[in-house]
Amino acid sequence: MKCLLVVNTLCGNASKVNEDALLRLYAPEDDVTVRYIRSAEDSYSLDGVDKLILCGGDGTLHHALALAKDKAIDLYYLPVGTFNETAKDVKPQGELARLGKIGETDFAYVAAAGSFTDLGQSSSAKQKKRFKIFAYFFHILKSYRVHRIRATISYGDFSETEDYTLIMLSNAARCFGFRFNRLHRHNDDELQLLTIKAPKKDNLLGRIKMFFPFFRAFFIGFSEPHFGKSVRFLSLKEVSLSLPEKTDFCLDGERRVLFGDLTARTVTHAARVRILSPRHPF
């Protein structure tokens, strides 16, 4: 069996990876190739690969899922990133059987656009290695601004066209470091949709008004559907988004530009994804 071990050295905790122990446990008799990701330009192929052992963060997993989209391989994921949101939602040695999908793009735990969603790309690899999770805190004030994302959101008999400062599709209990989504059930067939309408202006008053919906959503969280004046949160099997302009989305910490008419739902991935415990005595 051909096995590929990929270590993303750009991740904040990549130095903790014990390659020999990983291979003894998960590829003792395989033909192993080791690939290191040392820059954003580095890539790898899964052609002819039967097993992938992946060491990295949420973005590393996101890239691997895209490469393995139509490949029935065994994918072992060791989370050594900064947030590791995907892994925190799955028991060690557990399977990630249901992914989110928006348009033609799969995601493990979140697809979001708007306020604060650029934090995942704001810190350099050097900052993450030095400051770990605190590397993101330096960029919070810069990301604290009102977005005006024009979108039509439709599901069931509901359809609404509005300007939003946040549109989020969640496939996990956690995001941005907050365990806010108590409606999430691991590996079920529903996503959670969170929308926060945009204040009229991106000025001091607008940012003050924006604070309260975000506090409600992430600091208090949701254990049941919520239909407020500014905040909407509910579980859905499928939701349609129409974006008239190209919009930056954060998919598992990675930037993607989405546009046009999109459908979001959960799907079963071709790869068999198993989450390893970062606390394993490697």
Image (spheres, grey):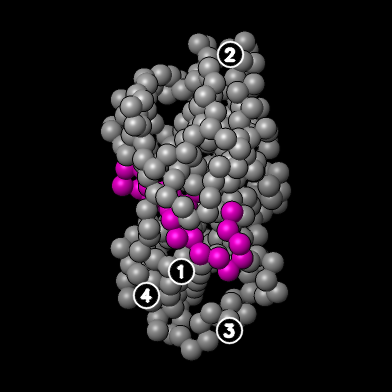
Q: Main secondary structure of the magenta part?
A: loop
Q: Which residue is mark 4?
A: 49
Element on which disc 4 rests? loop
Q: Which residue is mark 1?
A: 75
Magenta stretch containing residue 68, yes or no?
A: no
x then y, percent, for residue 254: 47, 46
Type of amino acid at the residue the image marks with label 4: Val
Label 1, label 4: how many angstroms apart (C-alpha)?
A: 10 Å
Q: Quadrant of residue 88?
A: bottom right
x then y, percent, for residue 158: 36, 25
- The magenta stretch is 89-109
**Circles 3, 1 touching at the beta carbon (< 8 Å):** no
Q: Which residue is mark 3?
A: 24
Type of amino acid at the residue the image marks with label 1: Leu
- Residue shown at the point (38%, 58%) measured from the top left: 268
Q: Identify the mark nearer the N-term, 3 or 2.
A: 3
Q: Which residue is mark 2?
A: 206
Element on which disc 3 rests? helix
Can residue 237 be seen in this snapshot?
yes
- Residue shown at the point (42%, 34%) measured from the top left: 248
Q: Answer left or right for 95 relative to 256.
A: right
Label 3, label 1: how many angstroms apart (C-alpha)?
A: 16 Å
